[in-house]
Image (cartoon, rainbow, N blue to C red):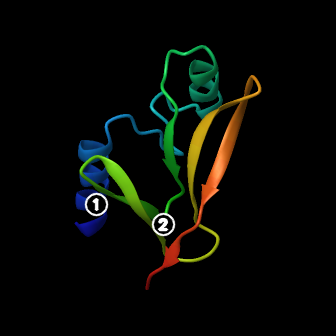
């Protein structure tokens, strides 16, 4: 139940969310939509990672282990750029 609640809170607070499962079910299609301006740049989280938003701003990234990460996905020099966000490891 906790994972579902956390995901709901992330989506509710952040607005535009891009997940590794993706809105379309195809991350490559999401990347193309970002490049074309059809989707805004946003956050992506691996399974086992999450983001905390307060007042609409991302304030903390957490992960169950170092292999699960969160990213900010945007366009840089005409290409998709994934910036890894440092995470606090929680257990």
Q: Residues within 10 Å of mark 1 (few under 14, many from 20)?
A: some
Q: Residue at x 24, y 50 (%)?
A: 55
Q: Position of residue 71 (x, y in %)?
A: 57, 51
Residue toward you, 57 or 2: 57
User: In the figure, 79 relative to 42: above or below?
Assistant: above
Q: Which one is earlier in the sequence, the residue at label 1 or at label 2?
A: 1
Whether residue 15 sits left or right of residue 83 in the image: it is: left
Q: Secondary structure at mark 2?
A: loop
Q: Secondary structure at mark 1?
A: helix
Whether residue 14 sits left or right of residue 42 in the image: it is: left
Residue 79, by quadrant, is top right
Q: Position of residue 36 (x, y in %)?
A: 60, 14
Q: Residue furthest bottom?
A: 91
Residue 75 shows which numbered tag? none
User: In the figure, 73 relative to 71: above or below?
Assistant: above
Q: Residue at x 48, y 66 (%)?
A: 48
Q: Which residue is mark 1?
A: 6
User: In the figure, 67 relative to 85: above or below?
Assistant: below
Residue toward you, 39 or 8: 39
Q: Residues within 10 Å of mark 2 (few under 14, many from 20)?
A: some
Q: Residue at x 34, y 50 (%)?
A: 57
Residue toward you, 84 or 11: 84
Q: Residue at x 54, y 45 (%)?
A: 20
Quadrant where the C terminus lies? bottom left
Q: CA distance from mark 1 to mark 2?
A: 11 Å
Residue 48 shows which numbered tag? 2
């Amino acid at each position: 139940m906790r994972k579902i609640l956390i995901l709901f809170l992330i989506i509710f607070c952040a607005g535009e969310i891009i997940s590794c499962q993706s809105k379309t079910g195809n991350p490559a299609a999401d990347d193309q939509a970002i490049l074309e301006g059809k989707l805004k740049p946003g956050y992506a989280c691996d399974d086992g990672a999450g983001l905390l938003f307060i007042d609409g701003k991302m304030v903390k990234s957490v992960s169950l282990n170092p292999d699960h990460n969160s990213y900010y996905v945007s366009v840089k020099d005409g290409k998709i750029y994934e910036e890894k966000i440092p995470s606090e490891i929680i257990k």
